[in-house]
Image (cartoon, helix red, strand yellow):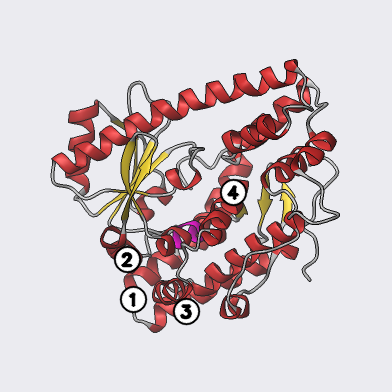
């Protein structure tokens, strides 16, 4: 049995959110969601509620958490606290409605121009939505830039060193608070992922999201993109990663053989397996039951939830030595396959991270680097 994830006493908002999102499995002694609510947020004061909303927002679970709280706590919540929740939900749903209408218009414009486009990351959290809109296309960057400027009067944001390596561009659109981040031809923290990128559009599927239809990655590709983001770039989990992955698993949407094959081809199988193990351990800590993972996933995982800790609003994955070893395995795999260009790109990551850390220390910001 894995050790519990380390949570400091100051993380009561995280604990309250986790109890709402991951209620214990029902059993004779298992508390209900409503009972958990009584011990969590039914009597919350205004300041603590604002803290909880801020944490839920940054973890992309605001809609799901407050929906559960309102539905399960109908008898426990007084009118004042229920109204706080309804107001927060109304504001967030208005933001999401505006963002998805723009996202649909952008995707439609790509299709009208004969350009492929797949929505990555942003819609994984539905009915919540990410803090920016992420797309992937194989189209020529110049054509994409022209389309965004001509159709949406978009301005291109200044690109950092990391953006240039990753082959991604950010666009700012009038009337859209969120930036639109478009990955072109490559994926990964340094643009080292060519195979995953090339296969992505052909494996994508159509999904209905609200009143719109979008093309999104296949489940295996979606999990690999999440792994690249969490285990190889940012080194932290959001609660939405836990919720989203659990929903995929319990819906039977994950073909684990395909996931292993695809992740091996991209050189990140151990990272994917570790990502899945962390999700499972976090679920087990709160719900009492983890994910039903095949043994070959657990065998490939380098570590689990016992190495994760909560700090600065997120569940943190240690960089040294855990994530550094995953990076080393990925780089070694690329070198063995003689993917020299991708290896060279990935080899720049430690230098980029060091420059970002130095810039953060000197100026208080890593802007322009990471």
Q: Secondary structure at mark 4?
A: helix
Q: Percent x, y for residue 100?
A: 38, 33
Q: Nearer the viewer, mark 1 or mark 4?
A: 1
* Residue nearer the viewer, 50 or 369: 50
Give the residue at mark 4.
358
Q: Residue at x 63, y 60 (%)?
A: 279
Give the residue at mark 3.
332
Q: Earlier in the sequence, mark 2 or mark 4?
A: 2
Q: Is residue 315 above or below residue 89?
A: below
Labelled pair 3, 1 in contact (Cβ < 8 Å): no
- Membership of 216 in magenta stretch: no
Residues under labels 1 and 4: Cα distance?
A: 30 Å
Residues under labels 2 and 4: Cα distance?
A: 30 Å
Give the residue at mark 1.
339
Q: Which residues are magenta?
A: 224-228
- Membership of 227 in magenta stretch: yes
Q: Is residue 109 above or below residue 316?
A: above
Q: Percent x, y for residue 209?
A: 39, 40
Report if residue 364 is visible in the image: no
Give the residue at mark 2.
194
Q: Earlier in the sequence, mark 3 or mark 4?
A: 3
Q: Quadrant of the N terminus?
A: bottom right
């Amino acid at each position: 049995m894995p050790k519990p994830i380390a949570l400091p006493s100051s993380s009561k908002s995280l604990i309250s959110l986790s109890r709402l999102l991951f209620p214990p499995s029902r059993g004779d002694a298992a508390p209900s969601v409503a009972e958990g609510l009584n011990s969590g947020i039914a009597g919350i004061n205004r300041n603590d509620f604002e803290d909880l909303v801020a944490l839920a927002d940054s973890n992309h679970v605001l809609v799901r958490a407050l929906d559960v709280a309102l539905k399960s706590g109908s008898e426990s919540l007084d009118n004042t606290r229920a109204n706080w929740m309804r107001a927060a939900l109304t504001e967030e749903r208005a933001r999401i409605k505006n963002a998805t209408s723009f996202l649909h218009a952008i995707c439609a414009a790509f299709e009208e121009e004969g350009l492929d486009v797949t929505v990555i990351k942003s819609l994984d959290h539905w009915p919540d939505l990410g803090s920016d809109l992420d797309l992937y296309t194989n189209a020529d960057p110049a054509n994409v830039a022209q389309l965004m400027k001509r159709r949406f009067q978009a301005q291109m944001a200044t690109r950092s060193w990391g953006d240039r390596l990753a082959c991604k561009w950010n666009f700012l659109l009038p009337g859209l608070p969120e930036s639109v981040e478009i990955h072109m031809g490559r994926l990964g923290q340094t643009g080292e992922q060519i195979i995953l990128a090339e296969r992505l559009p052909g494996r994508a599927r159509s999904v209905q999201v609200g009143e719109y239809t979008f093309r999104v990655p296949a489940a295996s590709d979606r999990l690999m993109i999440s792994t690249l983001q969490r285990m190889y770039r940012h080194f932290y989990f959001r609660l939405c990663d836990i919720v989203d992955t659990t929903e995929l698993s319990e819906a039977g949407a994950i073909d684990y053989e395909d996931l292993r094959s695809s992740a091996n081809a991209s050189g990140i199988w151990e990272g994917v397996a570790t990502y899945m193990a962390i999700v499972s351990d976090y679920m087990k800590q709160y719900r009492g039951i983890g994910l039903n993972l095949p043994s070959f996933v657990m065998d490939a995982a380098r570590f689990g939830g016992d190495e994760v800790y909560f700090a600065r609003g997120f569940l943190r994955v240690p960089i040294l030595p855990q994530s550094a070893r995953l990076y080393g395995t990925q780089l070694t795999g690329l070198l063995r396959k003689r993917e020299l260009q991708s290896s060279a790109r990935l080899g720049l990551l430690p230098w980029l991270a060091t420059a970002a850390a130095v810039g953060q220390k000197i100026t208080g910001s890593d802007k322009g680097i990471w």
